[in-house]
Image (spheres, helix red, strand yellow):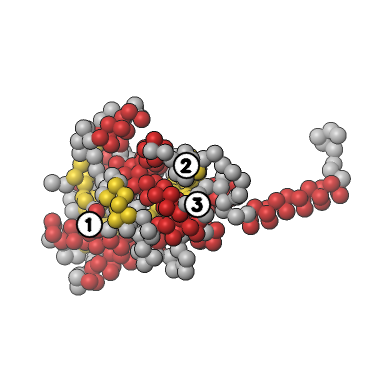
Amino acid sequence: MPISSPIPKLTRRAALLGAAAVLMFSAVLPAHNARAEDTVKLGLVAALSGQSAKSGEAITRGIVLAIDKINADGGVLGKPLELVSRDDEGNPGKGLVAARELAQREGVAAIIGGLDTPVSFAIVPFVNQQKIPFIGPWAAGTGITKNGADENYVFRVSAVDEYVDEAITEYLIANYGAKKPGMILINNPWGESNEKGLLKALEKRGMEHAGIEKFESNDVDVVPQLTRLKENGADSLFVVANVAPTAQVIKSLDRMGWDVPISSHWGPAGGRFTELAGKSGEKVHFIQTYLFTDAADPMFVKLQEKFPEIKTLADVTPATGIANAYDATLLTAAAIEKAGSTDGAAIREAMYEISGIKGMIKTYDTPFTPDDQDALGPEDYTFAHFVEGQIIPIK
């Protein structure tokens, strides 16, 4: 039949009914199909392109290193561990589609990912419904793990906004004597999560703030927002945004000639921040969970062996993404082995039973409980800044 020929009505109707049946089937398809697999699959959903690509690259590297170690030690359930990746491009809708595909088509045992908090929030209801473990190595929104589900399948090896906000507040007070900080926050769920945490931290100390200003990720000038904070008497700034938006805040401060102490969530660490922000970007002090400080570090040496493009410590920006993802992979693999199965419910229960897992950040002894599904806390944070393109700890 020529391509231009009309499709008979019955044929077209049958095709539509068939497509609908496929869609209905995929919607109810279990997260883990029963066919035998030669490997145990782990899924990754992260921004592998766009402004957060460096963070996605770091997460991927951490997972790959961990999988190499696990497979060298015999794999999981007697099989090699395999990574299946999907790029969410920092888009919540695409992140949800990627999670569905990994769970329903690829049959992964668990999903690691959610670099951006809005993406993680989009994925959380799906993984809880499908009963598939979801382990976050980056996104810090408090409500990601504290999501109210009766059976919560979301775990995290990363910073948590509520804890970070406490740490930032204390840092500004201790180091700069801050009495009236101003907030400039990205206008999305991540910014909203930190607004709640920062207000709570200030209220706890009986402190006032100079205002709460929001801005968009594509704004190229935030002078009006910063001007309002300055006029309201801000003696320091909380900043919450990723690489490019935070760089615009710094450029706007430079245009204003306002030299004010700045403490930030770890957004600036997600790429080559000072290339965008200029020299003033080095003034921003931000949270990290891990830093490479010595080129002789055995893990850094392994990174260089695996990824020859890494020449110096500055080439692993951000190290925190590597470490979080490495540790998250080890913990997930340990839970699968403990469960003796790739069944999601069994893995979830095993997450509460694993202990003594030596990661890059620390050794994890009972990292998760049903009341606290975050493996890292404030004691695992450190402050850092960029110096000549390299993230180094604040001395």
Percent across and percent down for residue 185 are 33, 57
Identity, as a three-letter code, of the amino acid under mark 1? Glu
Percent across and percent down for residue 88 are 49, 46
Check disc 1: other Cα within 10 Å, few if <14, some if 14-19, many if 20+: few
Q: Which mark is residue 341?
A: 3
The residue that label 1 is drawn on is 379
The residue that label 2 is drawn on is 78
Viewer-proximal residue among 168 and 34: 34
Check disc 3: other Cα within 10 Å, few if <14, some if 14-19, many if 20+: some
Which SS class for mark 3? loop
Identity, as a three-letter code, of the amino acid under mark 2? Gly
Whether residue 379 is visible = yes
The residues tagged by marks 1 and 3 sit, at their Cα atoms, a distance apart of: 33 Å
Residue in the image at 42% along x and 53% along y: 338
Mark toward the start of the polypeptide (1 vs 3): 3
Q: How many marks?
A: 3
Residue in the image at 28% along x and 68% along y: 199
Mark toward the start of the polypeptide (3 vs 2): 2
The residues tagged by marks 2 and 1 sit, at their Cα atoms, a distance apart of: 36 Å
Which of labels 1 and 3 is toward the front? 3
